[in-house]
Image (cartoon, rainbow, N blue to C red):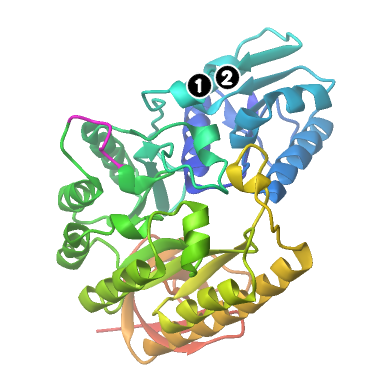
Amino acid sequence: MKKKVIINTLGCKVNQFESASFLCGFEESGCRAAKAGEDADIVVINTCAVTAKAGAQSRQTIRRLIRRHPEAKVVVTGCYAQMAANEIAEMLETPISIIGNGNKHLLVETALQENRCDLTMLMGRILNKKEICDLSMKRFDNRTRAYIRVQDGCSNFCTYCIVPYTRGPSRSVAITEVLKQSTSFEKTGHREIVVTGIHVGLYGKDLDEGYNIADLMLKLCQSHPDIRFRLSSIEPQEISEKLLQAMQSCRNFMPHFHIPLQSGDDTILSRMHRGYDRETFRRVIKKCMAILPDAAIGIDILTGFPGEGDKEFNNSKELLQEINATYFHVFPYSKRPGTPAANFKDQVPKAISQQRVTELRSLAEEKKRVFYSRFLGSARPVLVEHKRNSDGLLTGFTDNYIPVIFHGDDKLMGKIVDIYLEEINKDTLVKGRQEIN
C-alpha cells in the first residue's frame, strides 16, 4: 500500500517550489498525497521565520499536525527549523526529524527511512554553504502556474532580517539546470513560470558562467516563446537597463515588478542597511514606467521600524502617494532575535505601528483601484486558471497582474484568452468578458 504524505507549506515562493519538489520525490518513490480527512504516514512542515507571527504559525502548525496524525513520521524543515531546531525538539514529545535549509535535498530520503529514533537532525552550518540544494521536479502540483527557484540565500544582512542567517549566502542554479527545469514544466502543461529566489537579483554572481538575472530572463523567454514568465521580488538597485529592455522586447516576459521599498525615509533606510535612498527608488520607478507604462508595480513596505517617528513615517507615506505603484504589501516591523535591529533603541509601540499599517493599507487599496481603472474598457491577455471561484466564474490574471473573473466554458482553462475589462467589484476584482474576434 502506498504511503500517504501531507506537506504543509508556510511562507515564500521558494518554500512552495521546494515543497512541490518534495511531493514529486515522494510520488516517484511510490507514495501519494493524502486526501482530505485521511490519516497520513508522513507529515512534512516547511516552516517560515520571516516575522515573529510566521514563527508562531510554524509552531502552531507543527503541534496541530502532530495531534492530527499521531502515528505519522514528522519532518520539520524551512527557516523556522533552521533558526530554532533545539526549541522545536524541546517542545515535542514525539519522534521527529528536523532538516535544515542546506540539507533539503535529503528530506525525502530521510522521511522514507524506516527507523523511528527519538530525533533526527540534519542541520549543518548554513552560513558556510557554497552550493544550492539540488531540487527538481517534473510538474508543479497540478497548477497552471509554476515557480522555478533559480537562487537561494542572501548576502545583504539588512538589520531587521533573519533570512541571511536561515538561508545562508547567495547561491545560484546553473543556467543549464534552470532550462532543464523550465522545459519539464513546459512539457507537463504549465503556461506561466514565476522565476524566484530569496534574493533573485544576485543570480549568477557566484557562478563562472557570466550570466546575470537579465541574461537568464532573456534566455528563458527566447527558449520558451509560448510560456509566460514573471520575475519575483527584485531589489530596486538591481533593475538594470538590460532587464527593462528584455521585458520590453520579449512579449512573454510579463510587465510586472515587485520591488521592496521598506521605508521612504533616508534615515530609516540607512539604519535598515538597504543600500539606496528614496530618490534612487523614485528614479527607478519612473524609469520602469517610462519604458513599460502598463506594468504592474508591487511594493513591500515595513512600518514601525525602530526610530520611525511621525516625520519618518510621513516621508514614507508621501513617497508612496507620489509614485505609480499598483499594490503594496504592508508589514509591521517584527523584532527578530539575533538581528541588529532587535537591540536598537526607540522601538515603536505596537499600537502605533499597527495604526500606520492600517493607513498604508488604505492607501494601497486606493492605488490598486486607480491602476485597475486605467484598463477598464480595454482587452488584456488573461491566463485562465484551472479552477472556478465560489460563484462559478472563471478566474485568471492579465499580463500586468490584474485579477479577472468572467463567465466562460471549462475548455478555456489553461489557455491565454483576451478579456475585455468592464468593472471593478467590491472585492477589488475586475469583471470582464471574453473578446470574440
Disc 1 crowd, CA 10 A, few/some/many (<14, 14-19, 20+): some
Q: Secondary structure at mark 2?
A: loop
Image height of 147 relative to 282, above or below: above
> x and y percent of residue 142 in the render?
47, 46
- Disc number lying in front (2 or 1): 2
Which corner quadrant holds the C terminus? Answer: bottom left
Q: Residue at x 46, y 40 (%)?
A: 17
Left/right placement of residue 43 relative to residue 37 reads: left
Please, which residue is most extreme toward the bottom here?
377
The residue segment tinted magenta is 203-208
Q: Which mark is residue 181?
A: none
Q: Is residue 288 magenta?
A: no
Q: Residue at x 40, y 69 (%)?
A: 278
The chief SS type of the magenta part is loop
Given residues 356 and 121, the one toward you in this image is: 356
Q: Residue at x 50, y 63 (%)?
A: 267
Amino acid under label 1?
Answer: Asn
> x and y percent of residue 331 in the render?
61, 62
Q: Looking at the rendering, which quadrant does residue 111 occupy?
A: top right
Left/right placement of residue 219 relative to residue 408 reads: left
Q: Which residue is mark 1?
A: 103
> x and y percent of residue 117 in the render?
73, 8
Amino acid under label 2?
Answer: Met
Image height of 214 relative to 408, above or below: above
Which corner quadrant holds the N terminus? Answer: top right
Q: Is residue 256 visible?
A: yes
Q: CA distance from mark 2 to mark 1?
A: 7 Å
Asked if disc 2 and disc 1 are in contact, CB closer than 8 Å, the reply is yes
Q: Is residue 400 visible?
A: no
Q: Residue at x 75, y 44 (%)?
A: 56
